[in-house]
Image (cartoon, rainbow, N blue to C red):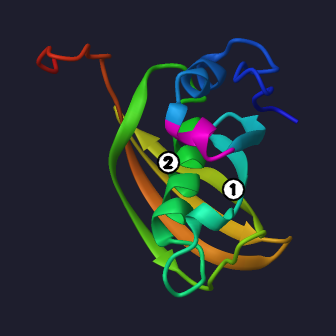
């Protein structure tokens, strides 16, 4: 498994994806783990906890989106340069419930110039689709807080 140890430190090398996840407190707080990665691909998993359930008794869509967005970030940062989301859309297909282990499988569709297009499928089990996410990426120059983007 590729992911975080209890200390929050990555248990694999220090590549661009691991460095990004090392600093990703939001994903760490939700227990999101990177379980597979490759050039333009990534798979992350998360277990739906009681704190992630909405008033209808199902996983809140924001948490499903965050899982998909984390897999998207891992896939688009696998090439090395800092890459951020330029936009994203999600379609919720079926509900998830407390205790469900969800997997988000991200796949690069194309990269052109500084932009890219990625699809992420969120699954329960091997085949049950919970959501489909499409992300648009943009390679960027890192900006420090308070500075104007280049």
**Chief secondary structure of the magenta portion:** helix
* Residue 110 disc label: 2
Residue 15, magenta (yes or no) = no
Q: Which mark is residue 12?
A: none
Where residue 56 appears, x then y in whole percent?
53, 87
Q: Is residue 80 above or below residue 39?
A: above
* Residue drawn at point x = 59 percent, y = 19 percent: 16
In the rendered image, residue 108, in percent from the top left (x then y), is placed at 57, 48
| Distance of label 2 from label 1 (alpha carbons) | 16 Å
Q: Secondary structure at mark 2?
A: strand
Q: Position of residue 50 (x, y in %)?
A: 65, 66
Q: Is residue 126 above or below residue 71?
A: below
The residue shown at (76%, 80%) is 128
Taking the spot 61% from the left edge, 47% from the top edge, the residue there is 30
Q: Residue at coordinates 88% horizontally, 36% vertically from top-left?
A: 1
Position of 33 relative to 57 (above/below): above
What's drawn in magenta, residue-wise? Answer: 26-31
Q: Which residue is mark 1?
A: 105
Q: Which sits earlier in the primary sequence, circle 2 or circle 1?
A: 1
Tally of marks: 2
Q: Nearer the viewer, mark 2 or mark 1?
A: 1
Q: Is residue 22 left or right of residue 60?
A: right
Quadrant holding the C terminus:
top left
**Name of the residue lying farthest toward the left:** 148
Q: How busy is the neighbourhood of tag 2: few (under 14 within 10 Å), some, or many (20 plus)?
A: few
| Residue 40 position within the rendered picture, expressed as x and y whole percent measured from the top left | 62, 39
Secondary structure found at label 1: strand
Answer few, some or many: residues within 10 Å of disc 1's Cα (few below 14, many 20 plus, some between 14 and 19): many
Residue 107 at least partly seen = yes
């Amino acid at each position: 498994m590729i992911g975080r140890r209890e200390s929050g430190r990555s248990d694999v090398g220090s590549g661009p994806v691991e460095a990004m996840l090392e600093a990703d407190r939001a994903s760490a707080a939700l227990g999101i783990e990177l379980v597979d990665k490759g050039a333009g691909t990534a798979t992350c998993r998360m277990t739906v906890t009681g704190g992630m359930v909405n008033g209808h008794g199902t996983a809140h869509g924001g948490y499903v989106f965050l899982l998909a967005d984390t897999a998207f970030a891992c896939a688009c940062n696998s090439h090395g340069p800092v890459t951020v989301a330029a936009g994203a859309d999600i379609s919720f297909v079926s509900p998830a419930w407390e205790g469900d282990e969800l997997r988000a499988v991200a796949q690069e569709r194309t990269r052109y110039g500084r932009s890219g297009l990625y699809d992420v499928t969120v699954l329960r089990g091997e085949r049950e689709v919970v959501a489909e996410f499409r992300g648009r990426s943009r390679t960027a120059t890192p900006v420090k807080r308070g500075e104007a983007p280049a």
